[in-house]
Image (cartoon, grey):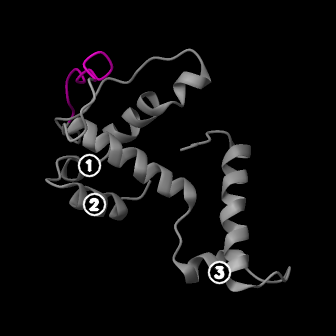
Amino acid sequence: VWDPYTIKGIQAVEAVQRRAARVTFNDYRRTSSVTQMLDELQWPLLSERRRSARLTTFYKIAHNKINIDTSSILQPAQGRTRGSHALKYQPINTRTDTYRFSFFPRSIPEWNSLPGSIVTASTVESFRAGLAACPP
């Protein structure tokens, strides 16, 4: 799944969803509010859907529900603070944007910022429900 990180790329992908909302309502007037259409359709932003999918995949990896050897990539974080959780990972240092915005370097900081109650959810469904209630 393409997950753009530049503002231009994000806006290009979001524009596709906005056009789809117009097609769904068959309303192409310039005075029509596409934001209102999206709200009526209850469609989350595509960037939110990609974040949810990325963190759900990370949850599956962290809880060994996907058979991926991450021993060379995921290192437990050194030390914890009051607000952190036991499943924190060491952020990956990167030099290029291409690698910085790839799956693991991009997902680890987002994962580490989640509350412990969400990260330690017992099922994928309860993780998704907790993630939906947690703002980005």
Does 118 appear above or below 93? below
As for residue 104 lying within the magenta part, the answer is no
- Magenta stretch prevailing secondary structure: loop
The residues colored magenta run 70-81
* Of the two numbered discs 1 and 2 in the rendering, the one whose residue sits closer to the viewer: 2
Give the amino acid at mark 1: Pro
Q: Residue furthest left?
A: 122
The spot of residue 68 in percent (x, y) is: 28, 29
| Tag 1 and tag 2, C-beta contact below 8 Å | yes
User: Within 10 Å of the Cα at label 3, are there few (<14), some (14-19), or many (20+) other Cα atoms?
Assistant: some
Q: Residue 37 — which label?
A: 3
The spot of residue 57 in percent (x, y) is: 34, 44
Q: Residue 130 — which label?
A: 2
| Residue 23 placement, left or right of 5 | right
Give the amino acid at mark 2: Gly
In the image, what residue occupies the spot 21% across and 33% down?
Answer: 81
As for residue 75 lying within the magenta part, the answer is yes
| Residue 72 placement, left or right of 98 | left
